[in-house]
Amino acid sequence: MNFIQLNVRCAPEFSEILIAELAEYEFDSFEENKQGFSAYIEEQKVDFEATKALLEQYAAITPLSYGLQKIARENWNKTWESNYQPIVIADQILIKTPFHDIPEDYTHVITIIPKMSFGTGHHATTSQILALLLNYSPVNQTVIDAGSGTGILAIMAEKLGASHVLGFDNDPWCIENGNENFGLNHCTKCEIVLASSIAQLQSPKVQVILANINKNVILSELDSYSNQLEINGLLFLSGFYAEDVADIQHLAETKDFTLIDQSAKDNWACLLYKKSK
């Protein structure tokens, strides 16, 4: 299977909105850089005409250039290894790869091989959930990681004391990648399965749900999240813009969720809810 790499050069203030727009077109991995960003999608999923129309729309209002290239899956490691840099979150979490030879004197160290999966800690949505988890550690709690990607949130949950973490993703590649990352981090309480909805898991109710996906999926899944959580369970949400918070908050209130914490970074939002009943 091949992938399409879309390289976009644009002003920094347009990178975030373009990444969000491209996510709606099924681009599912992104790497930001000083000139803009790169986006990746499986070749059979790309709609070239729609993608071009979107980029031309933005090119009409801001200086923007872009190019497409095909990448074989087996060459992905070389691509991300040349760009991936370690990251530190909240002065406590170091996220690195196996080839980074750097001091690991942090409270938590996570080793990730992202390959074609979302979730390296660099994106504001992932980093915000990781930071929030530090303040609401799931000690001895059961957790579901919805749209697990690399498994980074599941790994963090186990490192913070979760008794069991069930991740799921609708991409078979993420299942392979997640299991690989669980092994790298010596996780014994994490598992990941293939599914496109939390309702497909047929899992007992849990105490924590982590969902770093996008606004549309979150809105469609909120009812299932409510059904899957125990009373007083916590729901961590991210993957959407600050201006989307009102829509999510309005629906969450009808599903017995109470907002107890939130954050924002680079116009990306993160919300923490408690199930009230």
Image (cartoon, helix red, strand yellow):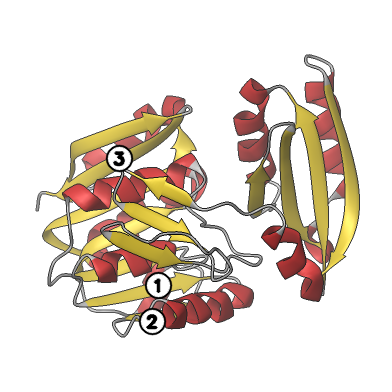
Q: Which numbered marker is on residue 191?
A: 2
For label 2, the SS is strand
Q: What residue is pinned by disc 1?
A: 167
Left or right, 2 with reference to 220: right
Q: Is residue 266 above or below residue 196?
A: above
- Whether label 1 touches label 2, CB < 8 Å: yes
In percent of width and height, residue 97 lies at: 54, 65
* Residues packed near mark 2 inside 10 Å, few (<14), some (14 to 19) or many (20 plus): many
Q: Is residue 89 above or below residue 4?
A: above
Between the residue at mark 3 and the residue at mark 2, the CA separation in whole angstroms equals: 25 Å
For label 3, the SS is strand
Q: Which sits earlier in the primary sequence, circle 1 or circle 2? A: 1
Between the residue at mark 1 and the residue at mark 2, the CA separation in whole angstroms equals: 6 Å
Q: Amino acid at mark 1?
A: Gly
* Residues packed near mark 1 inside 10 Å, few (<14), some (14 to 19) or many (20 plus): many
Q: Which sits earlier in the primary sequence, circle 3 or circle 2? A: 2
Q: What residue is pinned by disc 3?
A: 271
In percent of width and height, residue 128 lies at: 36, 43
In percent of width and height, residue 119 lies at: 51, 57
- Whether label 3 touches label 1, CB < 8 Å: no
Nearer to me, 35 or 210: 35
Residue at image location 27% in from the left, 35% down from the top: 262
Residue at image location 84% in from the left, 51% down from the top: 47
Nearer to me, 155 or 61: 155
- Whether label 3 touches label 2, CB < 8 Å: no
